[in-house]
Image (cartoon, grey):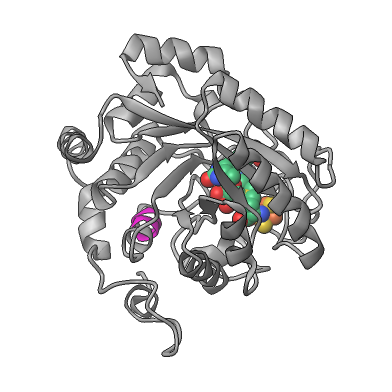
Amino acid sequence: MNNPAILSQPLSPAQPPLFHTPAWTLDAVLALFELPFADLLFQAQEVLRANFDPNAVQRSSLLSIKTGNCSEDCGYCSQSKRHQTELETQNLLALDEVVAAAQAAKDKGATRFCMGAAWRGPKDKDMGPVLDMVRAVKALGLETCVTLGMLKDGQATQLREAGLDYYNHNLDTAPEFYPEVVTTHTYENRLDTLRSVREAGLKVCSGGIVGLGESRLHRAGLIATLANLDPPPESVPINNLVSIPGTPLANSDPVDIFEFVRTIAAARITMPRSYVRLSAGRESMSEAEQALCFLAGANSIFYGDKLLTTNNSQADRDNALFEKLGLQGV
Ligand code: SAM
Ligand code: DTB
Ligand code: SF4
């Protein structure tokens, strides 16, 4: 069960509430997952069409600006120094490399550029170079997003003042399953960062991963938690686990594609005005599987040949698929 305290109460009386009185109970979200597939997709299409151009798909490109050697133990991640993965680590990139990658992403048609760092959170000395990256990418006319881990007081405001649009910080799964996935930080830590991102006036990008070994109840719990944020995240990435050899979750059972599509539809219905992003895991999906995700209300993708450390679906393949489906990349 979801922790009702997490869903309905401010974390401390002195702070404004991060959640409103639950608009979506866990039971209501679970009931969505249990609908006949066609009924669920029909409802998701209705919600999509009431709020968005149903044939427009937002495109964000990703760049890992600091790779690997992370102190955290997230069981799915290639970048934890606690897992024996084949990853080549990389210190913080130079500004000109980041600007060149952002310009290339823009030239290919991306409208948002997301920079990810394998940190528990940025140290004070990291902020200057990252703020320079945000300023420079924004100056190219792209929307900016960073994902740097947990933020300390004042860091979110520094980012906003540099021109940041979105901060990505995923809740990843249901509160009660999180300790099975990560032990070096808590769900409350994640929520605290989301709160400071909101208070700084940034837009929130927060979603999760399917395929960590969680149950349907946990998937519904993730969606309910996201949907009850007040306001819900503007951007909701739904990742399908990319299995990384050497990580504790490398051998998790893959989740059936229809269950993945149901998760997308539940996100669409419960967060009607949010961009729902079909995120990691797209490379191994067929065209038909991806088309089902768009039918279920996904209206954003990661675009470009690489995610952070793993391959993404090639841009040429995406362009061909959009052509076949009559989708317009925006
Ligand atoms: N270190 C920061 C953090 O944890 O917030 C930012 C980078 S972290 C890699 C960003 C997100 O990528 C994670 O929260 C998770 O949702 C997603 N992710 C990482 N590895 C993944 C994998 N193997 N498969 C699917 N999603 C993954
Ligand atoms: C998100 O939800 N997914 C992206 C982005 N936000 C930072 C990252 C996916 C990472 C997939 C595994 C990898 O490439 O390391
Ligand atoms: Fe580090 Fe983020 Fe990977 Fe966790 S998900 S190990 S915090 S890079």
**x 32%, y 77%: residue:** 8
Q: Is residue 268 within the magenta segment?
A: no
Percent coordinates x, y for residue 231 in the rendering: 33, 62
Residue 268 relative to residue 209: left or right: left
For residue 189, what is the image quadrant?
A: bottom right
Percent coordinates x, y for residue 303 in the rendering: 53, 27
Q: Main secondary structure of the magenta part?
A: helix
Front residue (pair 244, 116): 116
Residue 89 relative to residue 175: left or right: right
Percent coordinates x, y for residue 49 in the rendering: 19, 34
35 above or below 172? above
Front residue (pair 197, 304): 197
265 above or below 3? above
From which residue to which does the magenta span run? 218-223
**x 48%, y 17%: residue:** 318
Can I make out residue 243 in this image?
A: no
Can I make out residue 300 in this image?
A: yes
75 above or below 197? above
**x 57%, y 26%: residue:** 106
